[in-house]
Amino acid sequence: MNTNLKKLISLLLSIVIVLAFSMILTQRRADPLKKRLSAMSLRDKAAQMMIASFRVWKEVPETEDAEQPSQEPPAYNITALNDEVRALVSRDHFGGMLLFSENFEDAEQTLRLVAELQSTNRSGGGLPQMFFVDQEGGNVNRISYSTCGVSNMALTATGDPANARSMAAVHGEELRLLGIQGDFAPVADTNNNPANPVIGIRSFSDDPQTVAQYTCAYMEGLHDVGIAAALKHFPGHGNTDTDSHTSFPVINSSYEELKNCELIPFKAAIDAGADLVMTAHIQYPQIETGTYTSISTGEKVFLPATMSHTILTDILRGDLGFEGVIVSDALDMAAIAENFSMEDTLKLAVNAGVNMLILPSVKDTRLFHINERCVDILVGLVESGEVEEARLDESVLRILTLKQKYGVLDLKDFSVTEEKIAAAKDGVGSEAHRDTEWRIAGNALTLVKNENAAFPVELKPGEKTLILFADSCASRAGTGDLVRAMLKEKQALPDGAELLVMKNTRENEAACVEAALNADHVILVNRVYSIACLDPATADGFSTGTFDKVINAVHDVGKAVIVVSCQLPYDAARFPEADAILLTYWSSPMAGLPADGSTWSANLPEGLLACFGLAEAPGRLPVSIPALDGQYKPTDRVLYAR
């Protein structure tokens, strides 16, 4: 036997030994989880597949057609457990808990709520729960006292995926300090429809390759600090013109079309180690042809992705190779609740391949009673043979694997110590985290147009500047007061210079035009949250008509106008006569000067400071801005290219 052959045989033997050893280690790791699974009752397995959320307690009749009370029943946010919730959590050992804004008051209260839910569940014999929250940053920010974040579209506008990773790490660190292990983020949807009413700035871009890059960076930021990430909304919610919270969207894309666009970010993040994928309540009739008779209309509807074996098992599991946990979007959204019975919802979703089901959020006692029945319904489906118990076993093993990865199964001590409280108070919304947000918000500012040296304003002593807020962003007008205070603090207001802050209403159009004519500088702040905001004939967009008149009047006297867009960037096409257009990609409500200790988004304040030369605008467009037609609808012609 020659030397080369001996070396080859030796190498092959080494590989076999390594593979065998690896298989033994994997088997040893898996065996404890399989042992846990085998010890669980059918009821416990069913409950492990459910994520509950208790938001508001309000006593209402059991059925919608029952006699309604003469007065509106009192309601209170669930920031601590009442007897009813405590009994349900103790009985039904839900695998997860989803917290919403109603559950958050301050850091200590949150820690105590999480601990109470965990200990109540544990006292009933349940495995430790995994806690989740929708903390995307920007307009989906559930924790009032946390660092707000800047929106995903703003992250992409910085041109640096490292900013997405840093921002995600900030959110993740704050969640971990509150006892939360999973974030239903990042949004992996490609916002390829400007008329999309629900995704918008929650998406990184309208380019799938860019979305893939920033989705992976964001996910890595969460993983860096030990937080599980959930990609959403599979197979893509970016090409809808309706919202599945309030209607039942349809996307008529073929599988090939999805593969060439929407699926690209999901595939990239799955290959990079995604833990969870959240489903979309959207119909894809070219992919899933199964139908169901709607319980509210009696018409045939196509099974949504959440209930599609083709989409979840054949495509997500088979073609994309996802091995983690598939979680449904919330089952109380109109797309599901108005079309499917709860029994059929659970049956179809579980048989399609969903591993964890987000139960209807408890906002009244009727929804609470629905939650009370869900475990029984799924158990009954298994006992009747409509769902195989093997489906539950597969799901629960995936859930246990996820919990083991993030240390949830090892949780034993749920006491709230002074050390935990102090760490959460110091860390959540900390100055360091806010500094990260401010830096990224500044890097995202995008100047898409600047003529006549309009930007930035060169404010001279005694001059007056008008900041006029559209009705659509009247709730943000306090940002003007904040910026005035910041300019004074920075000694950036020359002697006698004034800053006038106004809100446009249906009644004060003439006063707005007059105020603009009396000012030396004019800054118009506009907010688009739906395409209707671009149309002056609509209730959402009437201020754009006022802005048109302001721009024309100011130009007639030889002065310039800056338009600041503070949400969707598509209004950059709405004001072609504006001298300068600045995009911020988000703004948080601010009625007046914020109270000490409160948190708010940095996007718009930083944008307004930039208008006075106190910040740069180095950002670049993350989406292409289409030109508008005569009805203020987007066209196929690109006005400002990505």
Image (cartoon, helix red, strand yellow):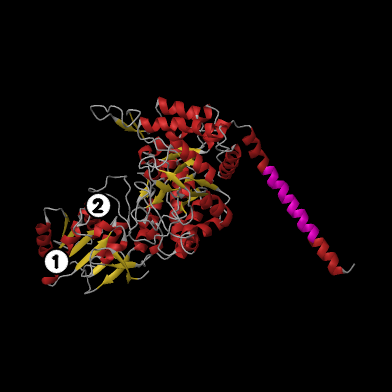
Residue position marked by numbered label 2 in the rendering: 476
Q: Kindly report the distance in space between the C-alpha atoms of the residues bearing marks 2 and 1.
A: 23 Å
Q: Position of residue 190 (x, y in %)?
A: 42, 60
| Eye-nearest disc, 2 or 1 | 2
User: What is the three-letter code of the residue carrying label 1?
Assistant: Asp
SS assignment at label 1: loop
Tell me if residue 203 comes above or below residue 599 in the rendering. below
Q: Residue furthest right?
A: 1
Specify the quadrant of the image occupied by residue 13.
bottom right
Q: Is residue 323 visible?
A: yes
Residue drawn at point x = 53 percent, y = 31 percent: 380
Q: Residue furthest bottom?
A: 452
Q: Where's the N terminus, which quadrant?
A: bottom right
Q: Which numbered disc covers residue 520?
A: 1
Query: Main SS type for the magenta part?
Result: helix
**What's drawn in magenta, residue-wise?**
12-29
Q: Position of residue 39 (x, y in %)?
A: 63, 32
Local crowd size for mark 2, using a 10 Å CA cut-off: few (<14), some (14–19), many (≥20): many
Tell me if residue 541 comes above or below residue 77 in the rendering. below
Lower sequence index among marks 2 and 1 = 2
Q: Position of residue 572 (x, y in %)?
A: 28, 65
Relative horizontal placement of residue 536, taking residue 187 as reference (left or right): left
Residue drawn at point x = 44 percent, y = 55 percent: 236
Residue drawn at point x = 30 percent, y = 59 percent: 606
Q: Based on the picture, tell me whether residue 28 belongs to the magenta stretch.
A: yes
Q: Position of residue 301 (x, y in %)?
A: 41, 48
SS assignment at label 2: helix
